[in-house]
Image (spheres, rainbow, N blue to C red):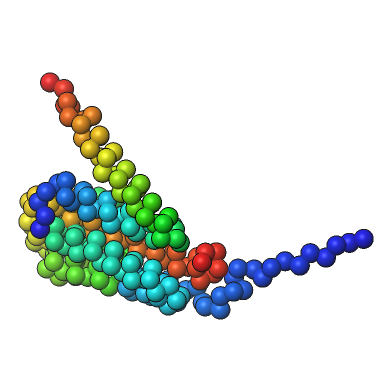
Amino acid sequence: MTETVVEPDAPAARHAVSPWLPCILAWLLPGLGHLRLGKRRRAAVFFAVVMATFAMGIASHGAAAAIDPLQPLTYLATFDNLALGPVELISRRLTYGRIVYRLPEDENEPARVALTDRLRARVRSVTFEYGSTFLLTAGLMNILLILDAFDIAVGRKD
Amino acid sequence: MIRSHFLNMVIFAALVAIFFAFLTQKETRDRVRVILILGGSMVVLALVMAYVMYPFPLR
């Protein structure tokens, strides 16, 4: 005799929310993705923590990374900064005086010299390393929030 | 701007611990435990490492 096994609804069936919208919202503003998914308390805490981390980075004279073809690790750092969403433009503007994502390749180009001079001015601050670490950490936190929002939206997590 | 290295470290550890507590736990009690263990470990281990590295570089 065969036994019929009734499986519970797949987790994904419990959520009718598209997983991509919370991810985009989470990128636009930390915590917004969780708010869209009805996790109000978590959204408020995530927003406060990520923005506090970002604010500490700004206050400690941290610098936003820009892609420097001569230094491959700057690709990762710039991607990490970008993960924070539009808020990241503030730190970029404060670091370089304008919105710039890539340094000119030629070391003698006046534009590159001007940008690196602005960067050096921040490096001289005693808390520069802390500030940059705070800025990078805020970006990493938001990457995790985007992934977490996706997991909640598809039902892998409550 | 906070110039104290120790205070910067404590604030960093607190923010990261709170973040992971809310990311990984659902109950308030569990979250508090994660904050204390994770935040405390980061600060204590950093101080231990600082003392271990104190004699270096050897001259």
Which residue of the protein is positioned furthest toward the top in this rendering?
B59
Coordinates of residue B19 in the picture (x, y in percent) = 34, 59
Question: Which percent across, then down, holds residue A88?
Answer: 24, 68
The residue located at (41%, 66%) in the rendering is A146
Is A132 in front, or is A82? A132
Depicted A24 relative to depicted B58: above or below = below
Compare residues B49 and A110 and report the one nearer the observer: B49
Number of marks: 0
Tell which residue pokes out farthest to the right in this image. Answer: A1
Rendered position, A24 above or below B43: below
Q: Residue at x 28, y 67 (%)?
A: A48
**A101 with respect to A154 (left or right):** left
**Residue A109 in which image quadrant:** bottom left
Which residue is at a point 22% across and 38% down the rendered structure image?
Answer: B47
Q: Quadrant of the N terminus of chain A?
A: bottom right
- Residue A7: x and y in percent read 72, 66
Question: Who's the residue at 51% across and 66% down the image?
Answer: A158
Q: Nearer the viewer, residue A49 or A145?
A: A49
Query: In the rendering, at what x and y percent does residue A76 appear?
Result: 32, 55
